[in-house]
Image: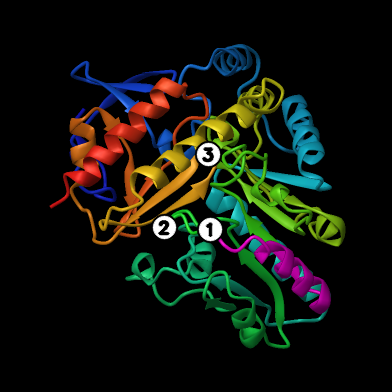
Amino acid sequence: MSVSALMNTYGERKTTLTKGDGPYLWDSEGRRYLDALSGIAVCGLGYNYPSVTQAISEQAKTLIHCSNLFLIEPQQELGKLLVQASGMDKVFFSNSGAEANEAAIKLARKYAQDKGITAPHIITCDKSFHGRTMATLSATGNPKVKAGFFPMVEGFSHVPYNDIEAIKQAATENTIAIMVEPIQGEGGVNVPADDYLTNLRALCDENGWLLILDEIQTGNGRTGAYFAYQHTNIHPDVVTTAKGLGNGVPIGACLAKGKAAEVFQPGNHGSTFGGNPLACSAAVATFKALVKDGIMKSGAATGNSMIAKFKERFANNPKVVEVKGQGMMMGIQLSQDCPTLVERAKEKNLLLNVTAGNTIRLLPPLILTEEQAQTVVDTVVQLVEEIE
């Protein structure tokens, strides 16, 4: 198929992928690649995972879509699974991470309006990425992706990540929420201090603010817990996720707890396709494989082992500033930008990407074997050593 009919939003694309199985993808020339990107943290179970494929097939034979004006059995089941796994109270389903974050922003604004705050203020972080709709773009702390789209939606300010004092200084009488990623993905796989989320929770409790955690990328077992905040003892007021929720079938979720869970009432928000039978059936099967089949835990162990190996092998390499990450979410920050590295990796039959200009981002499927994980490590080490 010619790409001439498509808007040029992704630049030049040289490879056509046609098939996937396990952690591997094949292109139109029959070449096989080991995938260390997972469609950007989407296919945590890899490709053609039997129970997910079966769930999609069976649901497609019965009911692909119906309106949210009716009860949907797979949606009810998925909602219960997510609420039980997260410790949250209620969930709203959408089609994507941007839409899930849009719901969270609308929820925070409605919460503020209900309290009499007519100009709500939400604090987010530098280097954050929350989506490409106008509200989520406004929340995003990356000037590059905003270029050409001004004016932004009002009501957001950005502070340095992992800096509690900066939040205190940025707060106003209209501040209603803090919105952060537990680990920044697009910003360079930035991992905060161990007490960052705990301190954010305390600050929100002290001021009556909502704590919104964007777990679009960190959720669904990517870091070893179903949600990354579960490595702590806190609960957010709102948590969003998408990407790995349906293992490739588009679906997003905005979960809320306590007072935040009661903000939306009939007519306040909605979605035509969000949480339809097909997407929810895929997500139910994905959830059960991740949690009940133990893939979430085994994947985290494999990922943490990879991080340890990278740290050991790059310990004295001046080209590497830092190896960071958790579970199957890892970044290797280099001392220089590496614009050709993605294509060079492809030449070695490995798919990965680079974020923030200088950070190799690895988001492999959680199903990697030890041998496949070692191949990723060896190939990435070789790629870095070959940088001039």
Residue stretch rendered in magenta on the structure: 192-211
What type is the residue that disc 1 sits on?
Answer: Val
Q: The N terminus appears in which quarter of the rendering?
A: top left
What type is the residue that disc 2 sits on?
Answer: Gly
The image position of residue 46, as x and y in percent, is 47, 24
Near mark 2 (Cα within 10 A), the count class, few <14, some 14-19 or many ≥20, is many
The residue pinned by badge 2 equals: 188
Task: Report the side of 141 relative to 215 (left or right).
Answer: left
* Residue plotted at (65% across, 58% down): 213
User: Which tag is nearer the camera, tag 3 or tag 2?
Assistant: 3
Q: Assign a secondary structure to mark 2.
A: loop
> Reading the chain from its start, which is encountered first: label 3 or label 1?
1
Near mark 3 (Cα within 10 A), the count class, few <14, some 14-19 or many ≥20, is some
Q: Total marks drawn?
A: 3
The residue pinned by badge 3 equals: 304
Magenta residue check for 93:
no
Q: Assign a secondary structure to mark 1.
A: loop
Q: Assign a secondary structure to mark 3.
A: helix
The residue pinned by badge 1 equals: 191
Q: Main secondary structure of the magenta part?
A: helix
